[in-house]
Image (cartoon, rainbow, N blue to C red):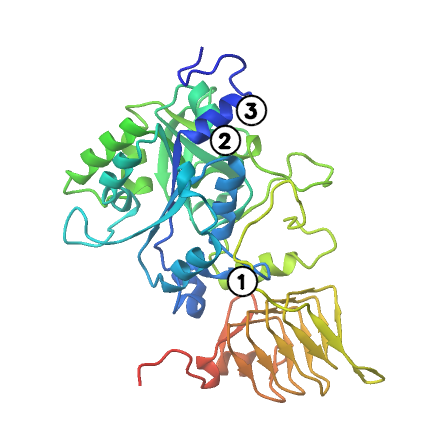
Amino acid sequence: MSEDGITGVANSPRFVSNLTKNSLALVLAGGRGSRLGPLTDWRAKPAVPFGGKFRIIDFCLSNCINSGIRRVGVLTQYKAHSLIRHLQLGWGFLRGEFSEFIEILPAQQRMNTGWYKGTADAIFQNIDILRAHRPRYVVILAGDHIYRMDYGQMLAEHVQTQADMTVACIEVGLEEARSFGVMSVNHEDRVVAFTEKPNDPVPIPGQADRALASMGIYVFNTDFLYEQLIRDADDPQSSHDFGHDLIPYMVPRYRVIAHRFRHSCISSAGSGNPQRCYWRDVGTIDAYWAANIDLVHVTPDLDLYDSRWPIWTYQEQLPPAKFVFDDEGRRGVALDSLVSGGCIISGATVRRSLLFSNVRVNDGNTLVEDSVILPNVRMGEGARLRKVVVEKGAIIPPGLVVGEDPVEDARRFHRTPGGVTLITPESLGQQLHFVR
């Protein structure tokens, strides 16, 4: 008999489903994501559109639903209107009668007169709400990564190893590891050292160019979490952050276990490699562009067509994409591209690009290549865009050329080190957000 009252194999579906039923997930979605530049001027990073029809936060929320965790709190703070509206429109299908919900937890000064000061403080300021839900386990998630993961497998491993806390981890290159919490583990994957964003990351033994990095995904025994949050809140020297404060404090004192992402990732169907795990931090414009453009490849690393693990989102009611004119020199075509509902490509050419919903590409030899076009963009006749990200609602003037002259692009727009040009309505003199 297990501690959850389930007899039999500890990793059986019934055992896992009982664990997920008694768990509450908390999604940390209050960050700005400043490295995305103008893409987060008017929205939090989890609300940034991704993949043609989704928002970034849809991936961790879909992981919760698909894993069987149907009690979820989303903690918001920075410019949360777009995020909250998306949650209200797209995630209201859970049934409260069955104790299923996605609850929005904005910063509201419940415990003191300040806003969320760190990831741990964000949870602490909602501790009375957590107590009311009475979960046995709490799963803490970052709302700004793209991946598919079965949290039920991580919960089962947490119980089997008798951990106080479990940290999901992934192997990354040493240079990349400087942006993560880096851990060292012993033979049973117990964490023996943890450093947040080290200048000189400790490599994995036997792999001098790789480090073990935290994914920002944690499982806690609930009473232990309360104990640590209260202790940290009472510490005036703490920055109240899991990576900087709580985990380094807990590692030498308690049983903190590393969970390998490969044990719970949902790999691409038909990839031929069951350990092909996808996880992306799309925290820069270059990374965001690359992750979106990867989706137009014949066999992308992220399989959005895998019905075993669907990504749920708000389904806007739109007509099918339309391609018009079949005249010589005036043919509406999209090649090696993803084109969402409501789009019209009129006598123009789109190559290796991803178009979100309601994009209009007008004729007149208009060309779009290697580009990510967000919703409701209008493209004037004769425009030529290469390797760009166009922000939602922008109206591209007729004849605009971007992606052929780096110096001119950098003068007019936001151009990244990787050569991606971000075009926003503001950079075109169009004011979508105004007071008067």
Query: Residue 187: x, y in percent?
Result: 48, 20
- Measured as percent of width and height from the top left, residue 284 is found at 48, 60
The numbered mark, 3 or 2, whose residue comes first in the sequence reads 3
Residue at image position (52%, 29%) is 153
Q: On the rendered image, what quadrant is the C terminus found in?
A: bottom left
Number of marks drawn: 3
- Looking at the rendered structure, the secondary structure element under dot 2 is helix
Marks 3 and 1: in contact by CB < 8 Å? no
Q: Residues within 10 Å of mark 3 (few under 14, many from 20)?
A: few
Q: Nearer the viewer, residue 4 or 115?
A: 4
Q: Disc 2 to disc 1, how far (Cα)?
A: 32 Å
What residue did someone put label 3 on? Answer: 13
Q: Which residue type does callout 3 highlight?
A: Pro
Residue bearing mark 2: 152
Vertical arrangement, residue 44 with respect to residue 345, above or below: above
Q: Which residue is mark 1?
A: 286
Bin the neighbour count of mark 2 within 10 Å (Cα to Cα): few under 14, some 14-19, many 20 and up.
many
- Residue 150: x percent and y percent? 53, 35
Q: Are marks 2 and 1 in contact (CB under 8 Å)?
A: no
Name the kind of residue labelled 2 in the image: Gly
Considering every residue shown, the one lying at the far right of the view is: 328
Is 412 in front, or is 273? 273
Q: Quadrant of the N terminus?
A: top left
Amino acid type at mark 1: Asp
